[in-house]
């Protein structure tokens, strides 16, 4: 299947309503595995809430969660990241655009085309190879400036903050306490968690001004 054919399918009534289906350079990846509540659902909610406060509330841009399709013809990519951030300045400059829905009222959109400012992927058992190996290369080709990879499955959180340099991602080295500089947020940030009742976790995106 080609990318144009996949996009036509994704916009049709025949496209499955359940599960995540991505198109990666000529291959279709389907994941219908339920997300783990404490290592996927809870951190995704925490991060999206914090990013909403930092980006959407001050009217810098949009924060999208789930079922937000990002497509790049240059990268042969069509995926639904866990979290997507698009600044209004990027929409104004045409680096990313909202694709209108067919046969719907004005202001209705079904897809983002181009390079969002930030993509967040939270690693799960079923998507480990795709999240850590395949998707970063695809997002780099698409020109996404900042990529966050979070793996909360182990005893310690793995948080990789990647920035695009000369077409490839470079990991921003954190300091001894886990702080890494985010160009998007204009500060240092880290992700922490603490035990919660009923065998759960409470996650937080912490930030600190650059010195």
Image (tube, grey):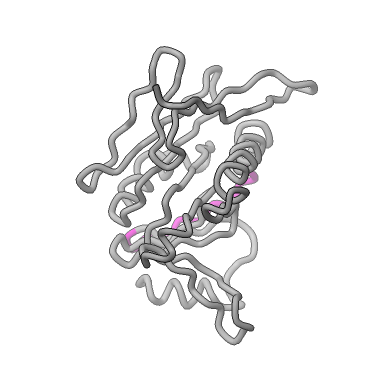
| Residue 33 among those drawn in magenta | yes
Residue at image point 38% right, 17% down? 175
Most distant residue in the bottom direction? 103
* Residue 2 pos. (x, y %): 35, 72
Image coordinates for residue 147, horizontal then vertical, percent:
40, 42
Which residue is at 61% across, 40% downward? 44
Q: Quadrant of residue 183?
A: top left
Q: Does the magenta stretch include residue 100?
A: no
Q: In which image quadrant can residue 90 be found?
A: bottom left
Q: Residue at the location (74% across, 21% down)?
A: 196
Placement of 145 over or under 161, stated as above or below = below
Give the quarter of the figure containing the N terminus.
Answer: bottom left
Label total for image: 0
Q: In which quarter of the image is the C terminus?
A: top left
Q: Range of the magenta residues?
A: 25-35
> Does 179 sit above or below residue 98?
above
Q: Where is residue 71 in the image (x, y as percent from the top left)?
A: 41, 64
As drawn, is 132 to the left or to the right of 141? right
Furthest residue toward left: 166
Image point (31%, 54%), residue name: 143
Residue farthest to the top, as pictured: 176
**Residue 104 falls in which quadrant of the image?**
bottom right
Residue 115 percent coordinates (x, y): 38, 58
Left or right, 128 with reference to 18:
left
| Figure check: 28 above or below 160 | below
């Amino acid at each position: 299947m080609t990318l144009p054919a996949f996009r036509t399918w994704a916009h049709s009534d025949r496209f499955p309503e359940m599960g995540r289906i991505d198109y990666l350079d000529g291959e279709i990846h389907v994941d219908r595995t339920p997300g783990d509540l404490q290592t996927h659902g809870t951190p995704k909610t925490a991060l999206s809430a914090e990013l909403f406060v930092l980006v959407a509330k001050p009217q810098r841009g949009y924060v999208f969660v789930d079922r937000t399709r990002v497509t790049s013809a240059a990268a042969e990519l069509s995926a639904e990241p866990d979290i997507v951030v698009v600044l209004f300045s990027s929409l104004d400059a045409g680096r990313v655009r909202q694709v209108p829905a067919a046969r719907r009222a004005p202001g209705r959109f079904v897809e983002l085309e181009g390079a969002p400012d930030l993509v967040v992927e939270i690693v799960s058992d079923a998507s480990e190879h795709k999240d850590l190996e395949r998707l970063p290369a695809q997002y780099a080709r698409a020109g996404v400036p900042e990529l966050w990879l979070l793996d909360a499955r182990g005893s310690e959180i793995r948080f990789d903050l990647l920035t695009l340099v000369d077409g490839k991602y470079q990991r921003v080295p954190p300091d001894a306490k886990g702080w890494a500089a985010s160009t998007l947020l204009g500060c240092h940030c880290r992700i922490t968690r603490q035990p919660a009742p009923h065998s759960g976790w409470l996650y937080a995106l912490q930030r600190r001004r650059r010195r």
